[in-house]
Image (cartoon, grey):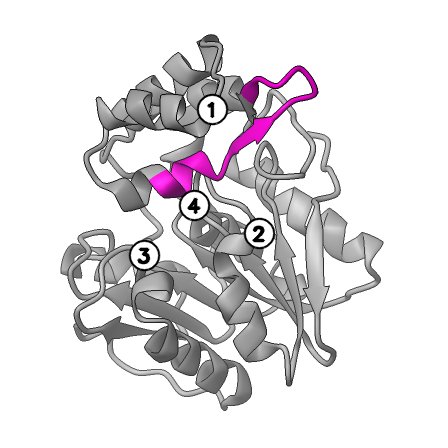
Amino acid sequence: MSAMLLNHRERGSGSAVVLMHGMFGSLGNLGSVARALGENFRTLNVDLRNHGGSPHDPLMDLPSMAADVVATLDSLGVERAALLGHSLGGKVAMQAALSYPERVAKLVVADIAPVRYVQSHSPIIEALGVIEQSEIGNRKEADSILAAYENDPGVRGFLLQNLLRGEDGKYRLRLNFSAIAAHYFQGLMAAPEGDHYDQPTLFIKGENSAYIQSKHRDEIRRLFPRSSVEVIGGAGHWLHAEKPQEFNQLVEQFMRGSDVYGPLVW
């Protein structure tokens, strides 16, 4: 396993907080969180491997992606950092905490549990595959392809952020689509693995999202014994975008606060 240095954006000063986006995303997705924390912390928004401006590699699984985070911290001279990840980024953050606990001061996991998921992004992967193999002349053409697979214009707009215009005038995905598709089920849907992480951990659940469920309590407590769960009312899976004020307030309080945790009740 060869770790790689991740494309990143820094803001502020103080204790380091690494912010990790979800699948098909990029470092700008958690920009509002970085702005909220930037007055008191050194925030590092990163592009996960095969996303955004980070290097491409055919290998894509949670251990290699966690190693990337630590290698990037090494390159920046950061001995210890808090980690915050949403969705796939939350899985990478959990894996980093389990594999390198001495490097992780605190952990925030946004709307994902430490379990293998059976939910499928297959329609989106199929749609992106069509775009990958097509000659796209403008964003409207790409959106028309996505619309056959995804009804939500907000989701399509999010995915279209990955479309970049080349020197030949054609639009292409900046994602390493082939690696994501090849490792989707075995590598990216997998549960993080390890003994346990014994530092303060906050799970934030969107009330209307099914990604964190009551049946996940035991596994959360086994792997993260000093954890608590907060629920943001009226929010779905994109809780940091849907309820930014509530989300950012929870994160900042946790980053500033003492080690307080209790029963996993939600």
The N terminus is located in which quarter?
top right
* Residue highlighted by disc 2: 27
Q: Nearer the viewer, mark 1 or mark 3?
A: 1
Q: Nearer the viewer, mark 1 or mark 4?
A: 1
Under tag 1, what secondary structure? loop
Label whose residue precedes the other's in the sequence (4 or 2): 2
Name the amino acid type tagged 4: Leu
* Residue highlighted by disc 4: 88
Instruction: Determine the residue positioned at 75% across, 43% down.
Output: 5
Q: Nearer the viewer, mark 2 or mark 1?
A: 1
Label 3 to label 4: alpha-carbon separation: 12 Å
Label whose residue precedes the other's in the sequence (1 or 3): 1
* Residue highlighted by disc 3: 238
Does residue 177 appear left or right of residue 100 in this picture? Answer: left
Residue 150 falls in image quadrant: top left
Expressed as whole percent of the image width and height from the top left, the position of residue 161 reads 48, 39
* Residue highlighted by disc 1: 138
Under tag 2, what secondary structure? helix
Under tag 3, what secondary structure? loop
Marks 1 and 3 in Cβ contact (< 8 Å): no
Q: Nearer the viewer, mark 4 or mark 2?
A: 2
Label whose residue precedes the other's in the sequence (3 or 4): 4
Q: Which residues are magenta?
A: 157-171
Of 100 and 90, nearer the camera is 90
